[in-house]
Amino acid sequence: MSGIGWELTTPVVFIIFNRPQTTKLVFEEILRAKPPKLYVIADGPRDDISADKSRCGETRALIEYSEIDFPIVKHYSDINMGCSERVISGLDWVFKKENQAIILEDDCVPHPSFFRYCDELLSKYDNDDRVMTISGDNFQFGKNQTKYSYYFSIYPHIWGWATWKRAWKMYDKNILIWPEIKENNLLNGFLQDKLSVMYWNRIFDKIYDGTLKTWDYQWVFSSWMNNALSIIPHANLISNLGFGQEATLTKKKDKFSNIPSSALEFPLHHPPYVMRNWKADRFTQKDHFSNIPRMCFNKISSLCNH
């Protein structure tokens, strides 16, 4: 668990929209963690969805009328910016003020140990440019891929994550260098898996030509362009509730929905190296990022439901 006498020292960013029920569950865990500061980023209602205005208002009211004993800073939009621009502009705003942050979406319920895990690793790898993301997700489905508290991966899962200002500076919204990467087949050597290369070529093509409006795949791209790693916990620390009728892109249940979270033991057992876990990543590639016929764009994030 989080540990007696331990206090969270990292600000938390909470990204909300129009889902009061799931927002309440995540917010309750944030309140228990007692961050030194809470940043709340909210998008505005969609003009063509009549229920949005009341649901957005109900969601924001959870923040407005709660008893909070730590500073809260709000960044609310009156108009609907869409998930891409809202998240990007919100995180830009946060990292003008903070050097590091823990980031939660309104449907990603964290285990209590998630906060301490992020807090300690943000400190440990603060000045290590090899690491850009600390993820709370473990999608190995019971496969024990490490004897340590976490391992390193090229895949920055962001259903509950943490990062630094130094890393967010590397974010490339428009992936401008993609044509050169594709022309020189640079993903082939990097991924070493034909189906995964096909998958990501299609993803990055759609991002580059503007037909896929999101923000998270650009974070993957930015991480790869800097040859950076992500930290993956030994235990899954996030349960994603964002599958169902309230979501737009993730209405159907699948195996990534409601994965149980469990405690991470402290003190953390750190690996004595910073190297990619190829075995775990190969499982992720085959299970997550190589099925071209299904080609679901909700594998990394469920936030883009607006």
Image: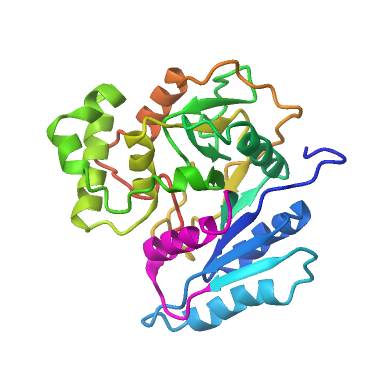
Q: Residue at x 54, y 66 (%)?
A: 41
Structure colour scheme: rainbow
Q: Is residue 256 left or right of residue 226?
A: right
Please give the count of numbered marks on the rendered protein: 0
Whether residue 254 is visible: no
> Where does residue 156 sit, x and y in percent of width and height?
45, 38
> Where does residue 165 sit, x and y in percent of width and height?
51, 48
Q: Residue at x 38, y 35 (%)?
A: 288
- State the residue in front, 36 or 29: 36
Taking the magenta stretch, the answer to whether it contains residue 235 is no
- Compared with 190, 301 (above or below) is below
Q: Residue at x 43, y 63 (%)?
A: 89
> Where does residue 285 sit, x and y in percent of width and height?
36, 29
> Where does residue 305 sit, x and y in percent of width and height?
42, 63
Taking the magenta stretch, the answer to whether it contains residue 81 is yes
Q: Residue furthest left?
A: 183
Q: Which residues are magenta?
A: 76-99
The quadrant holding residue 81 is bottom left
- Compared with 122, 243 (above or below) is below
Q: Residue at x 59, y 50 (%)?
A: 101
- State the residue in front, 128 or 83: 128
Q: Is residue 102 left or right of residue 70?
A: left
- Compared with 194, 156 (above or below) is below
- Quarter of the picture holding the N terminus: top right
- Compared with 15, 203 (above or below) is above
